[in-house]
Image (tube, rainbow, N blue to C red):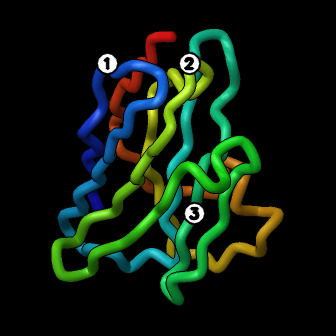
Amino acid sequence: VQLQAFGGGLVQAGDSLRLSCAASGRTFASSVMTWFRQAPGKEREFVAAIRWSRSTHYADSVKGRFTISLDNGKNTLYLRMNSLKHEDTATYYCAGTGTRLIVSSLYAPGNYDCWGQGTQVTVSS
């Protein structure tokens, strides 16, 4: 599976943005699809995940503001980001794995075997 993330950009605090992650190849054989982000000088951190069952998990920092969704017909993963804050500034990556992960394992980037190239989100304060 190849993943391609896009939709990032420069926005102001309080604005909304929707990221997309298009899958090609052996599409969505994944058990879980996830968004991570990485700010300069910081480690890559978990943002949100969605399982094949459509159950979702969010980092506390984005809960209530971000929504992850999956459109199997379009082979596309989305991340709707509302009420953006300056601290949301980062490069956002989509990732997937066919392995069933328990909740505590969702947060570790090393548990994912398929990654998109990243899309930059910059939120001006």
Amino acid type indicated by mark 2: His
Residue 22's place in the image compared with 18, above or below, is below
Q: Which label belongs to residue 10?
A: 1
Q: Quadrant of residue 76?
A: bottom left
- Label 3: which residue? 49
- Front-most of 101 and 70? 70
Q: Which label belongs to residue 124?
A: none
Amino acid type indicated by mark 3: Ala
Pick the quarter of the image with the N terminus. Answer: bottom left
Q: Earlier in the sequence, mark 3 or mark 1?
A: 1
- Front-most of 15 and 102? 15
Q: How much space separates mark 2 and mark 1, taking CA atoms?
A: 11 Å
- Label 2: which residue? 86
Image location of residue 42, percent across then percent down: 68, 18
Q: Earlier in the sequence, mark 2 or mark 1?
A: 1
Q: Quick one: label 1, few (<14), some, or many (20+) residues within 10 Å? A: few
Residue at 46 percent across and 44 percent down: it is 82
Image location of residue 6, percent across then percent down: 25, 40
Q: Earlier in the sequence, mark 2 or mark 3?
A: 3
The reply to whether callout 2 and callout 1 are in contact (CB within 8 Å) is: no
Residue at 64 percent across and 46 percent down: it is 62
Q: Quick one: label 2, few (<14), some, or many (20+) residues within 10 Å? A: some
Between disc 3 and disc 1, the foreground one is 1
Residue 20's place in the image compared with 122, above or below, is below
In what element is the residue under mark 1?
strand
